[in-house]
Image (spheres, helix red, strand yellow):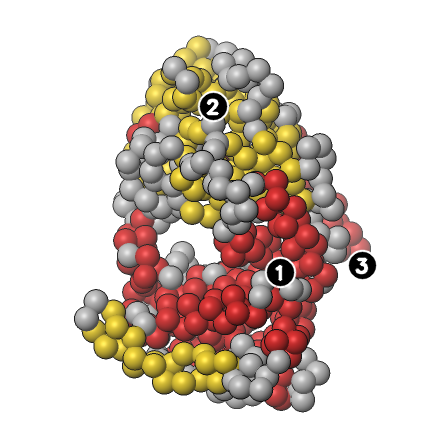
Amino acid sequence: MGRALLLGTGLAAVAAAAQAQTFESTFKPIRQGDEVAAVAVRSVLTDVPADAAPFSLSAPVVYAGVPGIADRVRDLVVTDSQGQVPLTSSDDPAAPGGFPYFRHWKPARAVSYPVTISYRSLVQPAGSRQGPPFGIRPSGGGVSGAGSGFLVIPEHVKGGVSRVTWDLSDLPAGSTGIASFGEGTAEVSGPPARLMQAWYMAGPVGRYPAHGQDHGFSAAWLGSSPFDPGTESAWSAKLYTYIADELRYLKPPPPYRVFMRFLDTPPVGGGTALPNSFMLSQASAPREPGSMGPRRTLAHEMMHQWTGGIDAPQGVSSWFSEGLNTYLTAVVPKRGGFVSVTDYADEVNEIAKGYFGEPARTWSAERIAQAGFGDEGVRHVPYNRGALYFADLDARIRQKSKGKRRLEDALRPLFIAREQGQRFDHAAWKAFVVRELGPGADREFEARILRGELFKPHTNAFGPCFELKTRTYDRKGEALEGYAFVRRPGVSDATCKRW
């Protein structure tokens, strides 16, 4: 008891020291003509303890397929009480597959705090390589993107509080600045690196609801959309509440923000989730009356809030973070009546095609990770292979429990433990499937998911309304034998919906 008390006191002192560090940043979007061309950043780092690691800055050279981020940093200047600090720079070795690697700036002399860091980050240019929407892009008189797409971060700081304010003086009247973690002046606890894992949007944004949140949900958008963003945001808010009720382990659901940007030039980027938020990025287009938004993407990205991830190497972890997410995105909205059974069947068969219809279906997880962002068909194999693995696992858990438990019931204790800080890695997963299915389930996981051994899912994967039928898929002239899910005669929509 005494030792535990002393340990706790020591941790509290460390935490207090870390919290004393502050990193305050002001973001100023700068227009050139009618479009934002850059974001000027001024940051001040203060209250860093004397025994902290040596001062060092970093920014991505490439981040998840988005190239040239550090190359677009201009006029980087660091100053302290002695004046301007000379900097030297070096780059990490390039990572395969478009995965992140960084540029580092280090001082040529010791620095004294407070330290001021100022620079401009140019927007990602039109026509650059397609990839997730991390790069900052102009649209609708404003700008948006992820922190990883424009920020230079003091990488030696491991705790504290970061604050963000906006200078919107160069944007249209009535503009607003919003981040994943707050609107206007906002702050987040933890190292400055946390600012990279957030979306940012500034400009004359549209909003849902007009003020505040809808049961923790809110949305903001820029640019000309082919659908009504307010209508799609209201649908998303209802689904967000339903997901929370179904999966139950995040109660009440945490505040969540959806960002939507509609771009006049490529790359458009698709949808990508970050903590408590995601960005939908599409091409701008005139409004089409009655047109619906990409609801499957909206559901998929919000679902990441619950599925989370697993401790595994970059890319390899996709079998869980994207595979489980793809599975739950198919089954949960269907249960709540957010999609029709017909649309559900189409989604399930896209999953089957994305696995059985790809030559990379037998590639190892490591080989797919090395391919990275170069081929979307290859990159999505873990999404679809993982989804079929989880559908198979669900059917077997239901069968073993005589219908009393399903996959989500089995996963809930793992999710709660992960939220409480317990390590969740491949060893933990293998122990879990052995508990659920018995000896050999761990080796089956390694064979199917890590080594890429082709497998046939359980006959009741995705529910009793389907039966597995053999199907030949054609991929660039190559015939690939696999399976499809065919609607079973006599099974009602209501039965399909309840599964």
Which image quarter holds the C terminus? bottom right
At a point 54% along the width and 53% down the height, the residue shown is 295
As drawn, the label of residue 1 is 3
Using the image, determine if residue 71 lies above or below residue 397: above
Q: Helix, strand, or loop for circle 1?
A: loop
Left or right: where does residue 251 sit relative to residue 21?
Answer: right
Relative to 466, say whether 196 is above or below.
Answer: above
- Residue type at tag 2: Gly
Amino acid carrying mark 1 in the image: Phe
Residue 434 visible in this rendered orientation of the protein: no
Residue that label 2 marks: 141
Location of residue 369 in the rendering, given as x and y in whole percent from the top left corner? 34, 60
CA separation in Å, label 1 and label 2: 33 Å
Which element is circle 3 on? loop
Q: In the picture shown, does residue 10 fall above or below 347?
A: above
- N-terminal of the two: label 1 or label 2? 2
- Residue 258 position, x and y percent, is 58, 42
Under mark 3, the amino acid is Met
Residue 348 lies, in percent from the top left, at 47, 71
Viewer can see residue 445: yes
Tell me, for residue 338, which label it has, or none. 1
Q: Would residue 26 be found to the left or right of residue 380 on screen?
A: right
